[in-house]
Image (cartoon, rainbow, N blue to C red):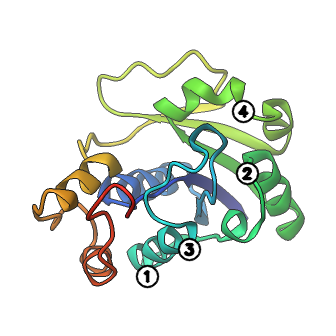
Amino acid sequence: MKILVFGGSFDPIHHGHLVAANVAREMLGADQVRLVPAANQPFKLNQHAASADLRARMAELAVAGADGLIVDRAEVERPGPSYTVDTIEDLARRFPGALLSLLLGSDAAELFLKWRDPERIRARAALVVYARPGEVPPEVAADRIIVVPRMDISSTAVRERVRSGRSIRYWVPDSVAEYIGTHRLYRDERC
C-alpha cells in the first residue's frame, strides 16, 4: 500500500489543499492521502484560529466521499506539540509494510531541516515536494518534486474573508463553509 501523508494546520482546509492532495495522489499512484491536521504545530504554537478538533472536523467534511482522501486524527489526539516524526513513526506502526511518502508544499519544505529529527522522517518516508507552475522549489533533498495547479487560495485569506463578512463560496467546499457559518468560526481574531 502507498500512503501519502499531508499534514498542516488546515485552518481552514480549502480547495487549494484538496487539489494538491488529489493531484499528488494521482501522480504518485498512492492508494490514499492521509490529511493530518496538526493539533499544535511547533512553528505556530497556540496560533491556530480554530481548535484542532474543529479543524479536523472541517477536513473530514471536505473529504467526505472523496476517493482516496482520508483525515487522520493522530496529531489531534496526541498530547503535546505535533511533530511529524512522531506521526510518520505512528503510521509505520499502524501500516506495517506500507510505502510512506510525506507531501510538503514549498513553504513547508523550506523549513524541513529545522523540524524535529528530519533524518528519522527521511528514514521512514520519501519526501515529495509540490510546487506551483513557475515556482522554484526550495533546495531540500526531495525524493520527488511534482507540479500542482496554482490556486491562489490560502487559509489566511479565507479567515480574512469570513472576518470581513465576504463570501467564501468556491474557496472552500460547501460543507466547510456551512460548518464555519454554523459554528461562527473566524468572525474575530479569537475565533
> Which residue position holds label 2?
81
Q: Earlier in the sequence, mark 3 or mark 4?
A: 3
Secondary structure at badge 3 equals helix
Secondary structure at badge 4 equals loop
Q: Which residue occupies the foreground of this view, 11 or 133? A: 11
Q: Earlier in the sequence, mark 1 or mark 2?
A: 1
- In this view, the residue farthest toward the left is 166
Location of the N terminus (image quadrant): bottom right
Location of the C terminus (image quadrant): bottom left
Q: Nearer the viewer, mark 3 or mark 4?
A: 3
Q: Nearer the viewer, mark 2 or mark 4?
A: 2
Q: Tag 2: residue type?
A: Pro
Separation of residues labelled 3 and 1 (CA atoms): 16 Å
> Which residue position holds label 1?
64
Separation of residues labelled 1 and 4 (CA atoms): 31 Å
Instruction: Locate residue 118: give its quadrant.
Output: top right
Q: Residues within 10 Å of mark 1 (few under 14, many from 20)?
A: few
Q: Are marks 3 and 1 in contact (CB under 8 Å)?
A: no
Separation of residues labelled 3 and 4 (CA atoms): 23 Å
Q: Earlier in the sequence, mark 1 or mark 4?
A: 1
At x 43%, y 57%, the residue is: 49
At x 65%, y 71%, the residue is: 73
> Which residue position holds label 4?
115
Q: Are marks 2 and 4 in contact (CB under 8 Å)?
A: no
